Image: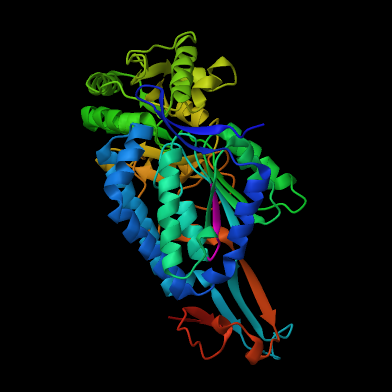
Amino acid sequence: MAAAPVWSVDPRTGKQREQVAVEATAQEVDAVVRAAQDARAALADRTVRAAFLRTAADRLEAAKDGLVEVADAESALGPVRLTGELARTCFQLRSFADIVDEGAFLDVVINHPDDTATPPIPDLRRYKIPLGVVAVYSASNFPFAFSVAGGDTASALGAGCPVVVKAHPDHPALSELVAKVLREAAVEHGIPAGVVGLVHGFEAGIELIKHPLVAAAGFTGSIRGGRALFDAAAARPVPIPFHGELGSLNPVLITEAAADERADAIGAGLAGSMTLGVGQFCVKPGLVLVPSGASGDSLVKSLTDAVSDTSAGVLLDHRMRDNFVAGVAERAELPDVDSPGAPGAGGEHTVAPGFLTVAADKLTAEGAYDLLLEECFGPVTVVARYADDAEVTAVLSRLPGNLTATVHLSAEEAAGEGRGAELLAELTPLAGRVLVNGWPTGVAVAAAQHHGGPYPATTSTSTSVGGTAVERWLRPVTYQGAPAALLPVELRDENPLGLPRRFNGRLER
């Protein structure tokens, strides 16, 4: 039977643009993984792989116009958004090149023998080594930054791990172009082109997670798809780490004092955050706790006005559009749920942004309203009106893990008056990033960033954004009593590479 074709589709019309590739067979997946495995040794030199990452960024920038054009044709995200996302992608590549050059991610620790300790300490030398081939599953909503050249790929290559990317079906043509750029950058530095593999197709993704030479995986997508791959990774004869980002409600709490102080600004800010990118951000605020009463009414009016000024938009594909329309309708049909923002279908190929409202007490116990506590991908949020602090606590206690949790406080609360600190502590167990007086959309690529959270937000405690993302693809190893002549150069006393390290308990930089 002939392999199934892979088509590039225009989400603005639903029409096929071109056939890009064919879905990979099990034999083809095996060949791509083995080619990646064969490229491992070429990544061992940190200077070479840092140069490779920088060249990849340079080449992506040089190809910007063509890449953005194809990305827009396949995603409908618009040239402005995509140009910014490509810039972020190049910044990520260069950031990991800097991390590779610095070498602190190796976590070098050396202990000389100490016979006076109890028990005695032998000669111990510890650092981290790359796991091996990493499988990367591209996201639909970030065709650059969470795809072929995205953060998972950049951090894995930075760790010294080749990658095999399972292309997302929403942007297969772009995936092919970006993979070609990365391979050309690799070859320029004497690294085999197979260091970045690419496969298409659902079955190829299953074969990839099962392949015995794949040592770890990174995923961004749905709870259903991510959980299936997570279970497959755990069911292997040799289980592997699976770092998956699956789904997030990203709750926002507005205190009554904050609503009294700036209801209009908060309503407008919420509208901007929940509709950004047609609501297709993983950190879109999906549940907002708003006080009952006059200040809450003012906030909802501001939200209504701002959302009504937001045009209908195109989602990444028609399947997502159908799921959004059906999901909004199912939620709106619940008793006592209102839809003043009128979310739903905006046209044959578009969706209209909006919001639903419900009394918070409906969410405090298990039942039909649990649907409102599940993520609905697209430009919609649920505004839950609470009567008192007890209802807030009851709703928060029922939430699953999230990427973010946000609280909006008044100036006095932010200065330490009232329940500000208590609310911050209440939100902390729910998320990997807790915001005060801000909006979760917009994830800075920075050393202190954490993009992860309790399950189902992610399947591990690691981050997929920021410098520490490299730690996902490394494992520690300690050498005991190894002769100096046999030690890896990173672990020798003289420190010829000038690495940051902890030497006999003292931090050296």
> In this view of the protein, which residue sits in the foreground, 100 or 143?
143
Left-right relation of 388 to 132: left
Question: Please, which residue is most extreme toward the front here?
Answer: 2
Residue 344 in view of the camera: yes
Instruction: Give residue 6's position: percent from left, percent from top.
Output: 51, 34
Q: Is residue 95 magenta?
A: no
Residue 150 in view of the camera: no
Left-right relation of 12 to 499: left
Q: How does the figure colour the protein chain or chains?
A: rainbow
Q: Considering only vertical position in the picture, is 341 above or below 63?
A: above
Instruction: Give residue 355's position: percent from left, percent from top.
Output: 36, 20
Which quadrant: the C terminus? bottom left
Q: Considering only vertical position in the picture, is 343 above or below 479?
A: above
* Count of numbered circles on the image: 0
Instruction: Give residue 283's position: percent from left, percent from top.
Output: 41, 38
> In this view of the protein, which residue sits in the foreground, 289 or 325?
325
Which quadrant: the N terminus? top right
> In this view of the protein, which residue sits in the foreground, 218 or 117?
218
Instruction: Give residue 309's position: percent from left, percent from top.
Output: 22, 21
Which residue is drawn at the image coordinates 27% and 19% (left, top)?
304
Which residue is drawn at the image coordinates 31% and 33% (left, top)?
276
Q: Considering only vertical position in the picture, is 208 above or below 347?
A: below
Which residue is drawn at the image coordinates 72% and 83% (left, top)?
118
Highlighted range, magenta? 160-165
